[in-house]
Each structure stands twice: as structure tokens, then as C-alpha cells.
Image: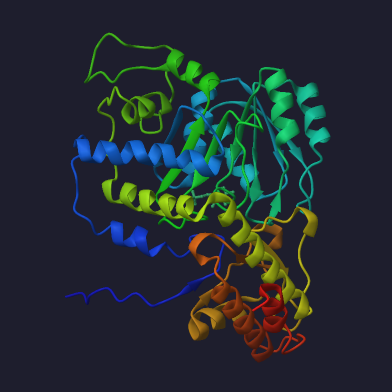
Amino acid sequence: MFSELVIPSRTIMTPGPVEAHPNALKAMTSTILGQFDPAFLTIMDNVKEMIKVPFGTKNQQAFAIDGTSRSGLEAALIALIEPGDKVLIPAYGRFAYLLGEICERAKAEIKYLEKDWNNPFAQEEIIQAIEEFNPKIVTMVHGETANGQMQPLDKIGAACRQRDIFFVVDMVATYGGVPIFVDDWCVDIAIGGTQKCISVPSGMSLVTYNSRVEAVLDSRYQKELGLSKDERNDHHISSNYLDLSQLQRYWNSERINHHTEATSMIYALHEGLRAVINEGIENVWARHQLNNDALVAGIEAMGLGFFGNMDTKMPTVTPILIPEGVDDGEGVRSMLLDVFHVEIASSFGDLKGKVWRIGNMGYSSRRENVLQVLGALEAAIIYCGGSVKAGEAVNAALKVYQV
Ligand SMILES: *Cc1c(COP(=O)(O)O)cnc(C)c1O
């Protein structure tokens, strides 16, 4: 006998997964619909339209891929890459190397443009590297969750478009939290996540792409043998499950039989996106910015330092230097979770043990959460033997909120 699930309550202030929107969770308890039930197809069509709003795009194509955010990254890259294709990857944090890992397995010729993780690139540096390497694809991360830095993209995208290069951007940690303009920035494929700023459980990835990419997909489409024997293609995409050329035909009027859509997840996605759109995308961005400002003011008032350039920090992630006296910071994190039921994140690679990351995303981006994490963090650091300026943090945040 196993006992029934008992899930403890949590305030999640990590860079994902974050607290799901209550409407998204409620929607997941709705009854299942068949994947080609007209009622479900209508839901899919509405979801497609709603996905476009946080991306800032009028692209025809936008849909969800079943699989966590990296499934979207992989689907996007393998849709464009054929063995030997040149890919430029400007890297200013951890997730750039995930893009590289995917490209490597797709047998691309990869060139990294690397730098320290304190800042994003000057766009001119990347444009110069594009001129030197002349890649078929440039792929990079908009917001680097691991170090909290955010890359301006508008000039890079324009430079790619001029040279007929594809520009593929990981917007997983910024989608629905900060202003994104896929069309104006000339991004050919953009990928968003669900468990971050749109407050839907992990398990899906969101993509949008333009007609330049549609043309590539059309040229690589291969119909599954079980559906037809006469649509073979020497240039077919290497994955069946993550084949955008088939997924597009599943999400559009053709409705080919590909996978079985994750019904309950699509319900959740519908409600998560609807909440964002009804709040107003500009209001959503402003809420994230305000909560970021209050969090930063509180951390500063505590006397703690930040990792990286504050002018280019993402409003959705704040990397904090772990103060002296609390070792690698894991004791403080455990105390936050066990005693205060508040979760914050550690970091990866060289930053592990040196940096805590506080997320400010989606439904978790609320005033009461910011105040709670500040109060709890101050108390836990003091209790664990670190030194902070006591009694200032929550007050500094309250001043930002002008309550
Ligand atoms: C979270 C994250 C990912 C990976 O997402 P999964 O859903 O865990 O696959 C990729 N890129 C960035 C920038 C992220 O923040």
C-alpha cells in the first residue's frame, strides 16, 4: 500500500518551474477530449493564436511541442541543420552550450563565440563574427537563466536577415516576462517555455517561425510510411517525434496523424496564456519589472552583492553573491525550503556555491512572494551565521511598492 499523495505548499522563487496559475491547474482536471474532436481542435486553434502574443509576432505558425523547453530548441535546430552546416553560437552562459550540444548531435560545424558570463555581447561583436564565419544559422539565448543576463537582439537579427542567415533564439526564460518582438527583431524561429513566465506546468515547449522556415520545412517533409508510401524525402528531418514539418501539419488544417496531443497540458496552456493576455501583455511586463525592482532594492538594502552587470540583468532572474559565513549557501537554501517553504535556486558550473538565483516569473511574480522571500532570506542568512544589514530589506521593497 502506498499512501495518497500529500504535496507540501511552496512559494517558488526559482527560475522555473514556478507556481502554476490556479486556472491552469483547474483546467487540467477537466475531462479528456479525443485528439480530433472538433471541440479540442478549436482549443488548439485558440492556443496557436494566444502563443503569438508574448512572442510579438504575426507569424502564421505558432504551436506547442510535447516535451520540455529543450524539445523546442532541438526541433527548431534539427529542422534547419543538415550535416556539415555551419552554426555560430554566441555564448555568454550555460544554455548556449545546450544549443551547441544539440547542433553537435545534428552533425553541424559549430563555432562558439565565447566570453565571460558577466555581460551579454555587444551586438557589433556578434555581427563581426557572422561576417568572419559566414554561418547558415546563428543561434543564441535571449535570457541566460544561469547567470541572469539578457542579450539585445535587434541588430543581430537584422544582420542575419540581410545575409540570408537563419536566426534561432531560445526565449524560454523571457517569454511572457519581458518585452519580446520576434518580427521586429528578425528572429526566424523563437522558442518559449511553459514552466517559467506563463505559469503552466513543465512538459511543453512553444515555437513560432516565419515563412522562410516554412519553406525549408516544406522542402524536407516526409510523410510517414503508415500514412502514404509515395512521399519519401532524401532530406527529411532526422527525428520523427520532433519533426516540425510533421508537427505543423498536425497543428494546421491538414491534421495529419502524428502524436496524440497531451490534452490536459493543452488545457493548462490555454488557461496560462489566457491569464497573460487578459492581464494585458504590457501590464504583465510591468508587473515583472516592478517585482524585480522591489526584489533588487531589498537585496541591496540587506547589503548583499549581485553577480553580473545590473544594466543587462533579466528582470526575471536575480543572481545574488552568497555572503561570507554561510559556506556554499546550501544550508540557507535548505532552511528556506524546510522552515519557510520558500524555494530559491543555486547555480551551475563556475557559479555553483557562489551564487543564489531568485526567480521572478509568471504567477510566482507577486508582491507577497517578493516580500516573503526577502524576509525569509534575511532571517535564514543570520541564523546560519552570515552577516547582513538586518531589518532593512522588506522595508526597502515596501518603498518600491509605495504601499
Ligand atoms: C529552463 C531553460 C531551458 C530548458 O528548459 P527545460 O524545460 O528544462 O527543457 C532552456 N533554456 C533556458 C534559457 C532556460 O531558462
Residue at coordinates 78% horizontally, 59% vertically from top-left? 310
Quarter occupied by residue 139 = top right
Residue 309 seen anywhere in this rendered image of the structure: no
Tell me the colour scheme of the image: rainbow
Relative height, residue 44 to residue 400 (above, below): above
* Side of 260 relative to 293 (left or right): left
Quarter occupied by residue 316 = bottom right
* Side of 332 relative to 76 (left or right): right
Number of marks in the rendered image: 0
Relative height, residue 2 to residue 103 (above, below): below
Q: Between residues 82 and 296, which one lies in front from this camera angle?
A: 296
- x and y percentages locating residue 261 in the rendered image: 28, 40
Relative height, residue 44 to residue 6 (above, below): above
Residue 402 seen anywhere in this rendered image of the structure: yes
- x and y percentages locating residue 366 in the rendered image: 54, 69
Q: Between residues 244 and 370, which one lies in front from this camera angle?
A: 370
Residue at coordinates 33% horizontally, 61% vertically from top-left? 25
Q: Between residues 237 and 200, which one lies in front from this camera angle?
A: 200
Quarter occupied by residue 386 = bottom right
Residue at coordinates 48% horizontally, 37% vertically from top-left? 207
* Side of 161 relative to 35 (left or right): right
Residue at coordinates 60% horizontally, 81% vertically from top-left? 331
Taking the view exactly as shown, the residue that stands out farthest to the top is 230
- x and y percentages locating residue 105 in the rendered image: 53, 32
Rendered-image quadrant of the C terminus = bottom right
- x and y percentages locating residue 342 in the rendered image: 52, 77
Rendered-image quadrant of the N terminus = bottom left
Relative height, residue 348 to residue 129 (above, below): below
* Side of 294 relative to 233 (left or right): right
